[in-house]
Amino acid sequence: VIAAMHLGGAHEIYVMGGIQAIGAVAIGTETIDPVHMLVGPGNAFVAEAKRQLFGRVGIDLFAGPTETMVIADETTADAELCATDLLGQAEHGYNSPCVLVTNSHKLAEDTLSEIDRILGILPTAGTAKVSWEEYGEIIVCDTYDEMLKVADDIASEHVQVMTDRDDWFLENMTCYGALFLGPRTNVANGDKVIGTNHTLPTKKAGRYTGGLWVGKFMKTHSYQKVVTDEAAAMIGEYGSRLCMLEGFVGHAEQCNIRVRRYGGVNVPYGEGAGYRETAEVPT
């Protein structure tokens, strides 16, 4: 990561972590200038530090516990694959939701059996079992359309799709953090190897935002310029009327003074230009 930052042109690199690092870069120290934005993953304490500092600095998003969903049918997935991918993410913590959405009762029942078997041999079962028992779900749907609706409603952070129509889900799903398409693709490889960003929305935030990407570092700005006397006077009359309707006389005067100066129209102070008959200002 440090090498990539260097090659990418980072001006300053500090090797540190935890809430103390968040505080240092957000507030500043004797040797570190405060930054404008904090991004990247962290544990619950780092996430809380970012939440408390939001407003003083920008953040990418407020991330919660890791979430995983497996969307599967019997055509490309089996119970061992589904159970492995669910529990592989359940070991993240004691509150990591894992959900299987399927249209196969058999796959659902077999996956439950496989989960019990794997929990008996998984070294991290102490964590994974708590997550599964407290937050795990298996949802059986009648149709693929219903599976799609359920998946979009949950808006999971990671969504593995193992069906006979993976591209259909890609084309139609709208609420998620990241999709992992096909039985050859899994979340762990996304974490460690594939290279896609892994700072992703949780707790249904996938309904309104995506994960961290280059656009998060870009700001949009706007500017206005009225260049003719005629435009200034015309806009001023409309603006003045709207301001008076809202009771903002001072706002209206910003418009009125332009009507007087650039439109040659005498508007008494405190009256809306759009309310009265206009008259030429005497020379």
Image (tube, grey):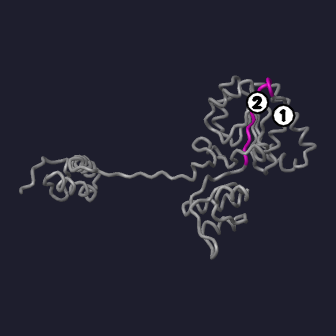
Circle 2 residues within 10 Å: few <14, some 14–19, many ≥20: many
User: Can you identify the residue that label 2 sits on?
Assistant: 162
Q: Which residues are magenta?
A: 66-76
Looking at the image, which residue is at 86% across and 30% down?
110
Which image quadrant is residue 161 in?
top right
Quadrant in the picture for the N terminus = bottom right
Q: Residue furthest bottom?
A: 30
Q: Quadrant of residue 118?
A: top right
Q: Is residue 223 left or right of residue 81?
A: left
Q: Position of residue 75 (x, y in %)?
A: 79, 23
Residue 173 x %, y %: 63, 32
Q: Residue at x 87, y 49 (%)?
A: 124
**Image vertical order of residue 197 relative to residue 116, above or below:** below
Mark 1: give few (<14), some (14-19) or many (20+) Cα within 10 Å.
some
Q: Is residue 193 above or below residue 78?
A: below
Residue drawn where x is 59% and y is 64% of the image? 35
Label located before the other in sequence (2 or 1)? 1
Q: Amino acid at mark 2?
A: Met
Residue 162 in which image quadrant: top right
Secondary structure at badge 2 equals strand
Q: Amino acid at mark 1?
A: Leu
Q: Quadrant of the C terminus?
A: bottom left
Q: Relative to 110, say whether 194 is above or below.
A: below
Q: Is residue 63 visible in the rendered structure shown here?
A: yes
- Could you tell me if the residues under marks 2 and 1 are in contact, i.e. CB atoms within 8 Å? yes
Residue occupied by mark 1: 81
